[in-house]
Image: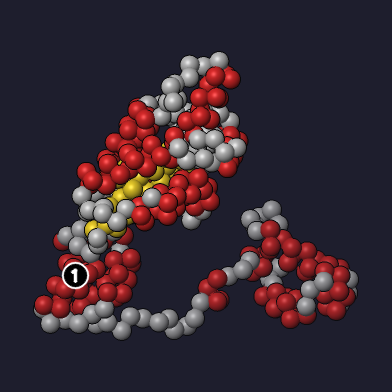
Amino acid sequence: VRDFKLSKQALIRLTWMDWYFSHGKNAEATCRHFSISKSVFYRWKNRFNKHNLTTLEFNTKLCTPHHLREMTTPTWILKKIYDIRLDDLEKSKYEIHEQLKREGIKVSHKVIQKVINRHIELKNTQHKANLKKHRNYSIARIKAAYELKDKGLGSLIQIDTKYLYVLGKRFYLYVAIDCKSRYAFIWAYGSCNSTNAADFLTKVIDCFPFPILAINTDNGPEYLLNFHLRCEELEIPHYFNTPHTPTMNSRAERLIQTAEYEFFNYQYDLLPNLKDINSRCELFNDKYNNRRFHQAIHYKTPSEYVYNYLLKEGGQPFSI
C-alpha cells in the first residue's frame, strides 16, 4: 500500500477486499459486514488487481460517453467569430451578431457566447478588473440597532423619498423625521439623485434644533455617492434598511402618508411649480412641528416635546 498513493475512498474499498479474502471469499458476509450492496461489491471486485491497487480508484474516464455532442455550426463560422472577437475584445456577442448578419451569416447569440467561453484569450479581463475595482468602492450596508430609535433626540433620523404628482408633472418629496421626538422636515425637488439628497441633508441639519447623530435610509441610489460622502464629511453614521423592508423606515413612511392625506390632498390651487410646492412644504413643516398633536408623544407637538426634553436634560431649550 505504501507504494501507492490511494484516496480515502480507495482505501475503504481495499478494506472490503482484505476482509473478503481473509474470510473465505464470502461475498455475502462481506456485504453484510460493511452494509454495502452486492452490485457495488462485485463492481469493485471485478476491477480489483492486487498488483495494481489504483484499480480501486474512481476512474472518470469510464463515465465519459463514447460520443460527445458537438456544435452543429460550421467550422468556418466559428473561426470567423473567433477572429472578430480576437481583433476587438470589447465587442459583445450582440455586436458580433450584427456584423455577421450584415455579411449574410445567420448565427445565434448563444453560439457566439460559447465560442468566447471556450477560448481564454477571448475573455475581456480588463472588464472584469474594472468590475472588481468598482466593487471595492461599494458601501457597506450597516443596519441600525433597534435601540437607536428611542435613545435620545437625534439618535436616529429616518429619511425617505416619495414622488408627488401635481397636474401630471412629477416631483420628488424628501422627508426626514426624528424617531424620538417626531420632529420632521420635508422638501421637494425636481429630480431624484444623490446631489439633491445631499442638499436636503444640509437643510435638515439647519432646520432641526438638535444635533443629528445617525441617519437611516433605504437602499435607493439617491442615498449613495454624494449623500453618503456628505454623511462621511459630517461624521454622521449612515445606516441602511434591509432590502424590500420599508417597515425599518416606518416613521418616515408614516410622515409621507400624513403629508399626502392631511395636507397635499387639500391643496386644490397647487401649481406644478417647484417654488410654489416648497412654499407649501414650509407651511406643512410649521403645522406638523408646532400645531399638530401626536399620540405617540402623549398628544404634544414635536416642538413642545423637544423643548421639554432639553429642559429636563439641562440643555439649552429653543423658543417655541
Give the residue drawn at x 29%, y 66%.
116
Q: Position of residue 230 (x, y in %)?
A: 33, 32
Residue 22 falls left or right of residue 270: right
Quadrant hosting residue 117 = bottom left
Quadrant hosting residue 194 = top left
* Residue 234 in view (yes/no): yes
Q: Position of residue 165 (x, y in %)?
A: 29, 58
Residue 167 falls left or right of residue 103: right
Query: What amino acid type should be assigned to the residue bearing mark 1?
Result: Ile
Badge 1: how crowded within 10 Å, few (<14), some, or many (20+)? many
Q: Position of residue 187 (x, y in %)?
A: 32, 42
Position of 105 relative to 128 (above/below): below
Position of 125 relative to 71 (above/below): above
Give the residue drawn at x 31%, y 74%.
110
Tell which of 314 and 199 is nearer to you: 314
Q: Position of residue 137 (x, y in %)?
A: 35, 40
Tell which of 132 and 17 is nearer to you: 132
Q: Quadrant of the C terminus?
A: top left
Instruction: Name the residue tied to disc 1.
Output: 96
Give the residue drawn at x 15%, y 78%.
101
Q: Quadrant of the N terminus?
A: bottom right
